[in-house]
Image (cartoon, rainbow, N blue to C red):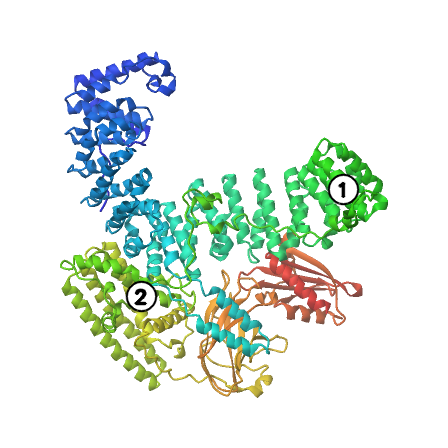
Amino acid sequence: MRAPPALSASAPRNGSRDSVSGALRRSASSSSSTAAAAAEMSASSAFIDEKGGSASEPEYGHDPASGGIFSTDYKRHDDLKEMLDSNKDSLKLEAMKRIVAMIARGKNASDLFPAVVKNVACKNIEVKKLVYVYLVRYAEEQQDLALLSISTFQRGLKDPNQLIRASALRVLSSIRVTIIVPIMMLAIKEAASDMSPYVRKTAAHAIPKLHSLDPEQKDQLIEVIEKLLADKTTLVAGSVVMAFEEVCPDRIDLIHKNYRKLCNLLIDVEEWGQVVIINMLTRYARTQFLNPNINESLLEESSEKAFYASDDEEDEDKKAEAATLAKRKPYVMDPDHRLLLRNTKPLLQSRNAAVVMAVAQLYFHLAPKAEVGIIAKALVRLMRSHSEVQYVVLQNVATMTIKRRGMFEPYLKSFYIRSTDPTQIKILKLEVLTNLANETNISTILREFQTYIKSMDKDFVAASIQAIGRCATNIGEVRDTCLNGLVQLLSNRDELVVAESVVVIKKLLQMQPEQHSDIIKHMAKLIDNIQVPMARASILWLIGEYCEHVPKIAPDVLRNMAKTFTNEEDIVKLQIINLAAKLYLTNSKQTKLLTQYVLNLAKYDQNYDIRDRARFIRQLIVPTDKSGALSKYAKKLFLALKPAPVLQSTFKDRDHFQLGSLSHLLNAKAAGYQELPDWPESVPDPSVRNVEVIRLLERVTTLTSIPDWSKCTSRKDRKEKKTEKPFYSDSEGESGPTESADSESDSGSGSESASASDESGSGSESEESREETESEDEEEDEEKEKKRKKRLDKTKAKKPAEESAESEQSSGTEDRKRGRKAVKNQKSASESESESESSESEDESEEESEEESESDTDIRKKKTPISKQPPKQSKKESKKERQEMSLLDLDDFEPAPASAPVTPVNFLSSSLVSDLEGLSLTNNILAPTTIAPSGSIKMYELLHRITGEGLAVEYCFSRQPFSPDPNMVAVQIQFTNNTNSETKNLHIEEPRLQSGMRIREFTEIDVLAAGESVTVVMGIDFCDSTQAANFQLCTHTRKFFVSIQPPVGELMTPVFLTENDFKKEQGKLMGMNEISEKLMLGEKCVNEHVIVERVTATANLSRVPCGSEKECRFAGKTVSSGCLVLVTVPTKEGGAAQLTVNCEKMLIGTLLVKDIMQALSQ
């Protein structure tokens, strides 16, 4: 039910000034009464006299705070009082409009309280509404006068007009006097049973007020809250949950019975109610459901064992793994958990930023990892909002990116900084960009940072330089590039840029100082030009710490600093003293006198910190008779190896606060904040959410039929209502043994749960329609059983694949028709559903019936040979359907016998494996043509025969185009069965890929006979990174965790360029895109032919023609993005050479240089 319209005659208390003055002008023009006109004139003349100015001037004297505080004008508002005492309702209405307008403009009208409160008993409904608006505002201030009219307020609670009843209750709850607590309690109890949802909503608002006035009433108030929680109207839901959160947030038992109803009402509640309910349900779900990501860590541990285990430990590991797998049950999502996720998902499209943020935090805290990604798009949409909203959203995104970086990687460009952004937004976006940086996107991020350094905003520039430092710390491959870039910034004209660069360089150099003595020397030369104290101090610390690397420069720097010691800032003076002490300990011959001079200067310094430091150091490093035992260890104290600083995000530890809360924003616990509970260890009883519903339905059993989901679940009943099963098991099918729930699966799983819960919410289904749907369900079951038997007969008779495909299609269409019929019956039965909801459930149930029929039909879909390469998506669906089948029908599931095995092409005995080079291993039209590895192509082990229990798997990168998708790297996989029995159903499951990576699986191998080998080709899009593609290699009995990690050279494909084209492209890829290294060629690299052979073996590049004999050029492009990779190797006399790689992707360039250098130097 919609909220009643706002009070029509009254201006809102916090309304705009313009609207109120407009109302006044309209009312003044419409008033024909001479008395009203006279009153108006007298009022305005009073204002003019008070102000002593013209009528056009503002009315300052009206307000005591405006300077008229010392005037002795006791006749203020006399005209309004006369109008209120009048017998005419029109005058009273005019007076009340003016008074409410004064309140809206922030003027004090409290002295009119006695005159206004008399009119609370006025018969005119418009006057009464405005009187209540006034009283709500001033009842707390004028409590004694308000108490005099309490009987009138009590009469107002019986008024036939719902707005008057609600206003009377609001005024009553605004009188903060403990003596009327019993009256308020009675009024709230009555209002909670009121026919009008608006009055019940007001009762819910009054509950926290009464609780704060008298906490002893808590038990009675909880009874009222329990009653209101059972309310079925959307108007009340948000307000009562707010009261629940204020009064008794720990009484989770009150929510059990109303959980499903709240989930289903959520979409229709007003926006602020949605925010409150979502936050409450987040806490509720954390106490009632298991962690959907509980199996993540266990899977990772077992995969590491399987991959790294040695031969000796293999048997023990297998036994231990089997034991843990036996103990660990596959995670099955509670249907109520799924209901919450499904019903909140549409709210991500809400126009209210707070609602979107609430849903985002719910998904982040409750959803399986595979489904959390859907919130990223919604949060990125909020980035187009006002800067205040952006600030809150970015704070939360920054926290999310630390734990779930892959979520926001596709939206990287949305976090690029605009010149119009405020500084705090810029710094938060920098934080997010830094958190998102990885090997694949670092080159683009660093390019962005380069432009930010040119900004005029000094704080932003400093933050950008710090961000470059953090990127260099986190991604070792670009550390040198970042260091070189920061060293170039040292010659910047802007002193702040130079100073910040010095501070960041100092932190980076601590990681590997011995390699960068040149940079330390360069910084030592800059010390005369840099004036920022922090930067000078950083340079001095670096020189002192690594004085052994610059033994000639360090004493000279100390000499120069001793000259200017007295003029330096305190932080610099302390570092000069430290530098002197370290040089005295390492090079006392040159620096003994200098150190004494500096210590003498410090001895008489104005700052006591510096005097104390000098006195302490003198005793420590200059041994005297009085010096204690510590002086022996001076060198160890000063020159101890210091750990490199850890540059980490300021948002690292914020995730212990609930996202979207004020505490998270402030990074400190705010008043009223409730901690997010930990997940329970064992499954709480899910039946608690059904109990109260049955009791409620028993009361009205004469009017309605009992919804299916609340019936007893005997075996007979389960068979009768088989169509409802997906409500309980869709999430099981989706989330599977691990978190393999796709976000797409929501659409397919929605119908039954939505319809079931809607039926529970509105018990308006007639007996006849329910019997009809049940009888239809039984017929459907019988038909399905017959079809299943027919299909089993067909598979036993080894029918060809085309027939099986046709039968699948026909059964799918028949099931679809039946699904539509069932939905129509449901639609006619449940009258309380809105049109939009029913149409949604119809679409969803169509998808559900399709999936169900397919899962029945295609239990072993991959086995049947088809004439085309099946697309990736359909494979995923069929796997998902297979899981659903196994989890849905646990009661009466008969495993279908395996269909006729396809004879694998070219089975070869293991003795012939060594002679396979140069042969094509299969002419199977299902897979792309496989290329037999030539002698130069290296084979890698994917699964050792011991780990694989007799199944050995090797792979190689065939360097041939992968025909189904040219952006994928072709990986050739060879299976060898070393056991005495057949291995069946070889296929891939659950690929775990980094963001952006894709995989195209090979067709399932039905049977691999004992001692035989077979080769297949699969495609992997590594997204131009060397990160591994992890997946499960499955047989009919076991699953093995395996990973394929590509060498950087295999991520490329050859490109044929002319010499001129090569030079032209190389000219475009200079600066940070060029990496050059000197090397000594190995003994065997005697001629050009060997160099070409080594380079092309390392990387999949083609030779570029070159005029010079002493230079070799190669060109290629990355398979995924098509970025050019140019390699030049000019040789010199004496076996020296220079290797240059030009590539837009800096990380690929860096890794390629390492690999080629290693190949050429051997």
Q: Are marks 1 and 2 in contact (CB under 8 Å)?
A: no
Q: Is residue 1122 left or right of residue 68?
A: right
In percent of width and height, residue 1136 lies at: 77, 63
Residue at 24% x, 29% y is 147
Answer with left or right where residue 371 lies relative to residue 80. Answer: right
The answer, for residue 394, to whether it is visible in the render is no
Question: Is residue 441 found left or right of 618 in the rendered image?
Answer: left
Q: Nearer the viewer, residue 927 or 742?
A: 742
- The answer to whether one can see residue 711 in this image is yes
* Amino acid type of the residue that numbered disc 1 sits on in the rendered structure: Ile
Number of the label disc, if any, that sits on residue 728: 2
Measured from the top left, where is residue 348 in percent x and y?
Answer: 37, 51
Amino acid type, mark 2: Tyr
Residue under label 1: 617
The residue carrying pointer 2 sits among few (fewer than 14), some (14 to 19) or many (20 or more) residues within 10 Å by Cα, namely: many
Which of the pair 73/1038 is nearer the observer?
A: 73
